[in-house]
Amino acid sequence: MIDNSLLVVTYLWDDPRFKFRSQFKYKPEHVVALYQQLKRFLHVPFYFTVVCDETMLKKMEGWTASYDHQLDKPNVILDPNLDKIDTYRIWDDYKDMGRCWRRLKGFSAYEFGHLSRVLFIDLDMMILDNITPLIHNNRNEPFVMADDSECGNSKYNGSFILFTPTPTTHKMWAMFNKNPEACKKMLETKGWQGSDQSWIRYYMDEVAHEPVKTIGKDDGLLSFRWHCMGKNIDPFEAGAKMVNFHGPYMPDMEDVQESYRWTRLYDAYGNRTAKIRGPRGYNFKSSQWCQSRMTPERLAGCVKIIENGGLNKAVAEFMGCSIGNVPRYFKQHPELVEARKVRDSRK
């Protein structure tokens, strides 16, 4: 029987030649952060797997094993589902090529053994809101990728790939596997950005002639580099669902958090435990984040709730915050005050 649950895959391996290695390194904390974000913002059944090398495999096992030692500490809230992070040892194919070439084997029909929907998502993705519509609305699209057209010599970005395993995806890997070095040199002549994403572009566009659906700014997926930094777009004000920190950036970098305060939300996701002295906006009773900014979509939702008779408790549940945070929304947004007047006039 085919399991229709979504398989979510992320990658973690130590590459000494990683060009941004001097600025940051991916760690088990980043895996935990991504998993916790997915648990909150992805409302479909899914398996979560991290594909890692031997070094990172030991670190992941050590991370989850030491988690049990936190159980007797006071004033902490633990994630009871941390053991649901599956680990999968990465293959050695293309290891010496560096960069992300080795991820291409993930499209082979011989890996993972999953026949239903698959999501490849990178550790540098920060999820801000419900991404379930992105999965549902594209359920009939055979291959979906993040848009990277803001970068002049790129088209697709490998940070978000949603697909159904088919003979086409298997052949995409098989063709590359026959002569990886020749394929790499051929792509260098085209001058395209990226490694695995440039091969996907070549194969899908020029060999298989298969459509690739892209998701980007209009779908709620922002690029930190091109949108937040380049165009000064605030993701909460824009109603974004995800921010892609591709390149030399991560949301937990000190200089990034200093300049873009909304990235500080990321810190609580990366911790195994949430101590009582947590970042502002964290609701320890419900273990949810209170979105510090009211977006137009949320404002419209709150107005509707209030006009239909909802009280502060209903607004707090909708916003994912404690009831004590609701009064400040009324102070900041007169629309809510007017909605309350409408509600009270009907009593």
Image (cartoon, rainbow, N blue to C red):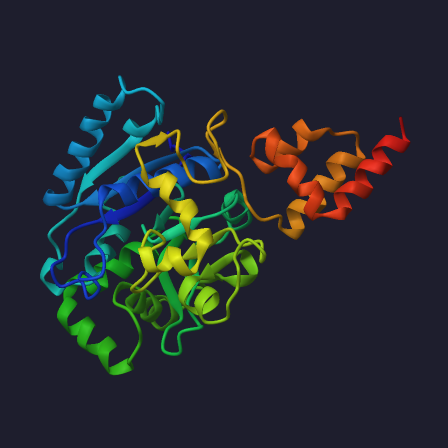
Image point (71%, 41%), residue name: 330
Q: Is residue 91 visible?
A: yes
Q: Is residue 23 above or below residue 89?
A: below
Along the line of sight, the residue nearer the viewer: 96 or 202: 96
Q: Name the image quarter holding residue 316.
A: top right
What x and y, as percent, mark residue 322? 57, 30
Residue 302 versus residue 88: which sits nearer the camera? Answer: 302
View extreme (bottom): residue: 189
Where is 100 relative to 154, above or below? above
Residue 165 percent coordinates (x, y): 35, 48
Picture layout, residue 224 above or below residue 4: below
Name above or below for residue 242 compared with residue 115: below
The residue lying toward the viewer, choosing from 119 and 217, is 217
Which corner quadrant holds the N terminus?
Answer: top left
Residue 157 screen position, x and y as percent? 37, 63
Q: Quadrant of residue 337?
A: top right
Q: How many marks?
A: 0
Q: Position of residue 244 (x, y in %)?
A: 40, 58
Taking the spot 11% from the left edge, 52% from the top edge, the residue there is 92
Task: Tell me if 304 is positioned left or right of 85 in this view.
Answer: right
User: In the image, is 46 to the left or to the right of 97?
Assistant: right
Q: Is residue 42 visible?
A: no
